[in-house]
Amino acid sequence: MCGVFGIFGHEEAAHLTYLGLHALQHRGQESAGITTSDGLKLKTYRAMGLVADVFTEPILNDLPGKSAIGHVRYSTAGGSHVRNAQPYQVSFGGGQLAVAHNGNFVNADDARKELEEAGAIFQSDSDTENVIHYIARSRAGVFEARVVDALRRLDGAYSMVFLTEKKLVAVRDPAAFRPLVLGRLKNAYVIASETTALDLIEAELLREIEPGELVVIDEDGLKSSFPFEKREQKRCVFEYVYFARPDSKLFGDSVFSVRKRLGQQLAREQPVNADVVIAVPDSGVPAAMGYAQESGLPYDIGLIRSHYVGRTFIEPQQSIRHFGVKLKLAPVRSTLEGKRVVVVDDSIVRGTTSRKIVKMLQSAGAKEVHLRISSPPTAWPCFYGIDTPSRQELIAASHSTDEIARYVTADSLGYLTLEGLMRAAGDASGKTFCSACFSGKYPTGLPGVSPSGRG
Ligand code: AMP
């Protein structure tokens, strides 16, 4: 779970990257960083925290140059520590480089072992650092050829941006697990994980970076090539379900529209006699609207979300039950009292939040609570860049839907089928999507990983 951004050829490169990262904040809240180039040297600032907290006006003014890359991170590989914050900036035989990565290399552990045995000294515990070592060791001439050399040794998900003194390079893996788009702002080129970042800085969306495409941007303009072996597309369907921002256009479709279609399909598959449909905000809202539309039931606001909850908060130990979720969500009694309520959320991971939400709705007077989930049971961990717990912690890995319904104390529980998800996502065959978190069918080998869970 990360967001990347890059810009080449703009006077305000650092400030625009800051804004781009702000729009991508939902993709990672742990750390943020920006590297700029003034044409002669690179400069990086990165720290733990949210974009708006990490960067101040003086810090941005101190990042000179017309090109920049940026990153927001939520750790999927490597711990939560500033040494793992990106971009990574290094000097090597070919000059200076910085890199920002969204995704996960599945053979990172083996690669690291091989590199360490050959003498490499790692500065972080992140899988991304492997790329830097391979680039440094490559015998290829130009920088982008070194990037290709490096990435040919690694397998998995990567939407990445690189910055050197003179070039911005963007690359997307051949399966295209994670999104990456190309935009234009006057004479500058812009790269971003999601279109919402282009919209904020008023850049025009040109197109997606294609599966397996390498784009090099320098003073001479933009050059595109496809240096990797072709493979079937495996776009992450969970980006549609939960991860991407609903105002983004992703894999050629509007995320909001897809989510609404998921809700409509869910209503067809899992109908229920009820009085009102409500969402778990924010992630459940579009699907709940779709559910209401399809079922003919009224949509209403039954939960209010606080937007001021930080990452850490001192909680009373025992005295207030379900305190964590109460900070984030509050029930609207007038919507719920005496009603048979359909509550729509996008997914159940451990089941702990859902249980608290159902109990909260019951305490606020709901007569019945019917939980509807706009994706299939999440039963398998992701190895391609979404932060999911180990298989042992995923409630659907070891419990039936009836058992989960009893655990969360709902009157009924209904999930969307995998077929329904694929149809609503726009590929009924399901072939072009990765849905491993639901099906357990991983589209790459997983070296060094036990089939029962992560690591
Ligand atoms: P849980 O209580 O563990 O079942 O959490 C379910 C909630 O977590 C749902 O409301 C989802 O929107 C949200 N969710 C799903 N996947 C993730 C993820 N990878 N990281 C953070 N939250 C998630």
Image (cartoon, grey):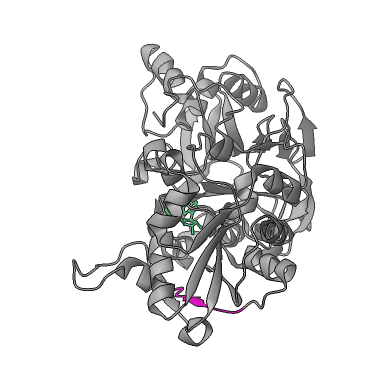
Left or right: where does residue 381 sit relative to residue 24? left
Whether 273 is drawn above or below 13: the answer is below
Residue 302 lies in the magenta-colored region: yes
Front-most of residues 185 and 278 = 278
Residue 439 percent coordinates (x, y): 58, 35
Left or right: where does residue 408 sit relative to residue 300? left
Hey, which quadrant is residue 359 in on the image?
Answer: bottom left
Question: Does the image show residue 260?
Answer: yes
Front-most of residues 193 and 215 = 193
Q: Quadrant of the C terminus?
A: top left
* Badge count: 0
Hey, which quadrant is residue 112 in on the image?
Answer: top left
In the orientation shown, which residue stands out farthest toward the bottom?
Answer: 334
Residue 34 lies in the magenta-colored region: no
The segment highlighted magenta reads 300-309
In the orientation shown, which residue stands out farthest toward the top?
Answer: 118
Residue 385 percent coordinates (x, y): 52, 40
Whether 448 is drawn above or below 20: the answer is above
- Which residue is at a point 77% across and 53% down the rendered structure image? 253
Residue 10 percent coordinates (x, y): 68, 55
Left or right: where does residue 57 sit relative to residue 210? left
Predominant SS along the magenta part? loop
- Which residue is at a point 58% across and 33% down the rendered structure image? 157
- Which residue is at a point 18% across and 66% down the rendered structure image? 317
Residue 5 percent coordinates (x, y): 61, 49
